[in-house]
Amino acid sequence: MKKVIALMLLPISIAFAQVNLHKSNANALGADAYITTPIHHNIGKIHAFALVLLFIIGLVATYKIYHRWQLGEEDVLPLIYRWWSGIIVSFFVLQFLRNYLSHQSFGEYQPITF
């Protein structure tokens, strides 16, 4: 089992080991070329897809709560609080990540200034 896990993680470790430290777009390797740059360029599509998933999860949660309420369960408020607080937190985390990642500039070295 350990060999299977090691073989599954080997391509990931190779991709991250080839990270280009000079940040030039001409020869981007590893995680920068295959993960960071595509996510940065497609952040709008990823955000829209995640919003659709949150909407579907919200519909399923609403159905589950309604179904339990119709079965005669009196105490559905904790269930409502758990589902909808999780969805609201996920929405705000998604908004924060979209705003944070959309304003990042990848492929260029920018020193931190104080």
Image: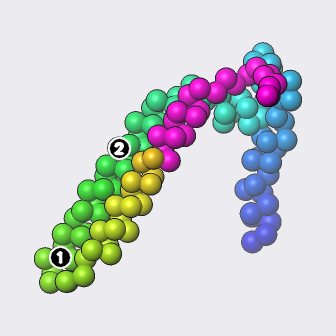
Q: Residues within 10 Å of mark 1 (few under 14, many from 20)?
A: some
Q: Nearer the viewer, residue 105 or 27?
A: 105
Residue found at x 45% / y 47%: 92
Residue holding disc 1 = 69
97 falls in the magenta region: yes
7 falls in the magenta region: no
Secondary-structure class at tag 2: helix
Q: Identify the amino acid type marked 1.
A: Trp
Q: CA distance from mark 2 to mark 1?
A: 26 Å
The x, y position of residue 113, in whole percent, is 80, 25
Mark closer to the observer (2, 1): 1
Residue holding disc 2 = 52
Q: Say whether residue 62 is left or right of residue 114.
A: left
Q: Identify the amino acid type marked 2.
A: Val
Quadrant where the N terminus is found in the figure? bottom right
Q: Nearer the viewer, residue 6 or 13?
A: 13
Query: Looking at the image, can residue 23 be seen?
Result: no
Instruction: Give the residues drawn in magenta, as a range.
Output: 93-114
Classify 17 as above or below 27.
below
The x, y position of residue 8, in whole percent, is 73, 56
Q: Residues within 10 Å of mark 2 (few under 14, many from 20)?
A: few
Q: How is the image coloured?
A: rainbow
Can you tell which quarter of the image residue 63 is in? bottom left
